[in-house]
Image (tube, rainbow, N blue to C red):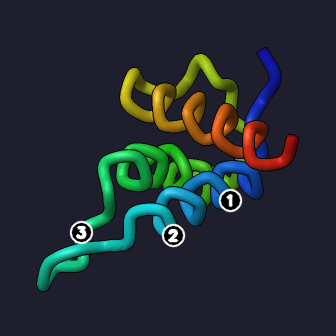
């Protein structure tokens, strides 16, 4: 499995945000964007540019895999 760049992770978060905008008075992120935002924040704090897919938890991994599948389906 290939590593995920910080730019790819940001694109995935923005994809989910545009697909399911924040809601409520608190502007809560959708489940997928929220799950991906945690490793994204860690990458920023730790000054990492890539992340192994294996480092994602179950929910973030599902959000990433769905994003890749949907993105690839939209570009074909």
Q: Residue at x 51, y 69 (%)?
A: 18
Looking at marks 1 and 3 on the same chain, the residue that comes earlier in the sequence is marked by 1
Which quadrant of the view contains residue 23? bottom left
Q: Which mark is residue 52?
A: none
Whole-Å distance between the Cαs marked 2 and 3?
A: 13 Å
Q: Residue at x 40, y 46 (%)?
A: 32
Q: Which residue is mark 2?
A: 18
Horizontal relation, residue 19 to residue 4: left or right:
left
Looking at marks 2 and 3 on the same chain, the residue that comes earlier in the sequence is marked by 2
Which quadrant of the view contains residue 51? top right
Q: Which residue is mark 3?
A: 28
Horizontal relation, residue 74 to residue 25: left or right:
right
Q: Which mark is residue 11?
A: 1
Whole-Å distance between the Cαs marked 1 and 2?
A: 10 Å
Q: Where does residue 29 sit, x and y in percent of width and height? A: 31, 64
Mark 3 surroundings within 10 Å by alpha-carbon count, few (fewer than 14), some (14 through 19), many (20 or more): few
Residue contact at pointers 1 and 3, CB within 8 angstroms: no
Under circle 3, the secondary element is loop
Whole-Å distance between the Cαs marked 1 and 3?
A: 18 Å
Q: Where does residue 64 sit, x and y in percent of width and height? A: 57, 36
């Amino acid at each position: 499995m290939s590593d995920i760049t910080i730019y790819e992770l940001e694109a995935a978060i923005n994809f989910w945000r545009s697909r399911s905008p924040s809601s409520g008075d608190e502007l809560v992120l959708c489940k997928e964007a929220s799950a991906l935002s945690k490793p994204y924040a860690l990458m920023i704090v730790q000054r990492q540019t890539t992340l192994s897919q294996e480092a994602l938890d179950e929910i973030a991994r599902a959000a990433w895999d769905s994003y890749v599948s949907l993105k690839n389906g939209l570009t074909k």
